[in-house]
Image (spheres, grey):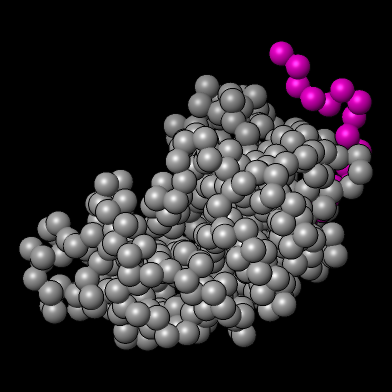
Amino acid sequence: MQTDDIIGSWQRHLTGQTGPLYLCIVEALSRSIRQGELREGDRLPPQRRLATALDVDLTTVTRAFNEAKRRGLLDATVGRGSFVRSGVGAARWRDDRQAVVDLTMNLPPMLAEPSMQRLLQEGVSRLLRKQDVGVLMSYRMTAGTTEERTAGAAWLKPVLGQRAVDEVLLVPGAQSAMLAVVSTMAKTGDAIVAEQFTYPGIRALAAQLGLNLSGVGMDAEGMIPDALDRVLRESGARLIYCTPNIQNPTTATMSLERRRRILSVAQAHNSMVLEDDPYGLLPTDPLPALAQLAPTRVFHVATLAKVLSPGLRTAFLVAPSYDHAQRLTAAIRATSLMGAGLMTGLATQWIRGGQARTILDAVRAESAARQRVARTVLGTAPCAHPEGLHVWLRLPPHWNSSDFVTYVRRQGLALVPSDVFTVEGKAPGRVRIALGTAADQPALLDALTSVAAAMQHKRAQGYDNVV
């Protein structure tokens, strides 16, 4: 196909397209390959000529070509130009769509500084110098060594205050900790309560154990005390699950007064509380945990996945008493046995050496910067915390959540629909957007710009797929 024909095809493709222009150019290139307009080894027009013909900045075309190279569509040689890469014939790309920008996983952003790769290399090297590799790679104590539990107590002191080390358990992830608590405190057929919109992990856990999960109405501060009182009366539940800080998905944070009222209701019904607090250390000035306000009534779960890295597979479970800690240790031994010594040793070393605090500070700063990007693009539509990892975006009335997620998926974006979180009532017209998974702030800006453009798109009648 002649150069002018290629440019004309791309011009037609770009007409009426929404989203970042550089991604539209990449899709035009991919489409030309799929349809056989471009073949392996074909040379592309010079970037400057393309920019002029498509009426875009040269930097936009350069960014598109870089993205195309990243996807394996192009090869480039200085002085010769850019060519369609060998091995990307029409058959390979027949079912191709834009590469998905995944904004579904609520992860801390990958940091340029401090470098996680450097910290891992130095940390593992230091660990191997100080500990016997046979001990690190062998079976270990369920719920952690004294050193590891002491580090956990120190790490959580800003939100928990001083806690006895024998009440602090090291667990391979928050889900394992929650399984230990729920399986210990409830049996098949029992009721437990959670926020009306809640973490999908507790929904899955309740279903797996055959428990009846009831939802509690929420406002801007999370669980409503009067609604909790009513649900506990009606359900007879003796275990309350909640996330008091930067709640997932709503981002609600309980005030100190709200925390005390929730605990008062729990006490009136003789109910225990499972406090899931993955984000509690992200705020610059964290509020006291429920487990600090009522230490004998609350099980506190704090994972490192959201504040440091999920790759550490390390969480801390703080029990209301020594007896509870013994029962939970037995449950952990029965379900997950132990944590991985290399990862728990590394996490402990980072906490004791100050690297964990450095990472946390950097994650907080980067998260705050990404929240500012989201606020610039999306305005006041989302519920958000200024130092949180996600936003809870309100959609225009012409979109429902599941249709919007399907639509933006076709634009190369992955979001989480509201029905995933809904325990009671109709799923609202909202989606959760995780800000930490984007490679950097410019990539996040592009993705959110596409989301904002999609929100303005008027959904056609009968948009839903019917097969």
x and y percent of residue 393 in the render? 77, 55
Q: Residue at x 63, y 34 (%)?
A: 97
Q: Residue at x 54, y 74 (%)?
A: 294
115 shown above or below 417: below
Q: Does residue 219 appear left or right of residue 365 in this picture?
A: right
Is residue 340 found inside the magenta-colored segment of the image?
no
Of the pair 244 and 434, the residue shown nearer to us = 244
Is residue 450 found inside the magenta-colored segment of the image?
yes
Of the pair 288 and 302, the residue shown nearer to us = 288
Q: Does residue 258 appear left or right of residue 345 in this picture?
A: right
x and y percent of residue 320 in the render? 43, 69
Task: Give the magenta range.
Answer: 449-467
x and y percent of residue 39 in the render? 56, 29
463 shown above or below 294: above
Of the pair 38 and 244, the residue shown nearer to us = 244
Asked if residue 264 shows in the view, the reply is yes
Quarter of the picture holding the N terminus: top right
Q: Residue at x 75, y 67 (%)?
A: 221
Q: Does residue 87 appear left or right of residue 16 in this picture?
A: left
For residue 388, which quarter of the picture?
A: bottom right
Asked if residue 377 shows in the view, the reply is no
Of the pair 153 and 98, the residue shown nearer to us = 153
Q: Does residue 67 appear left or right of residue 77 in this picture?
A: right
Q: Residue at x 13, y 79 (%)?
A: 130
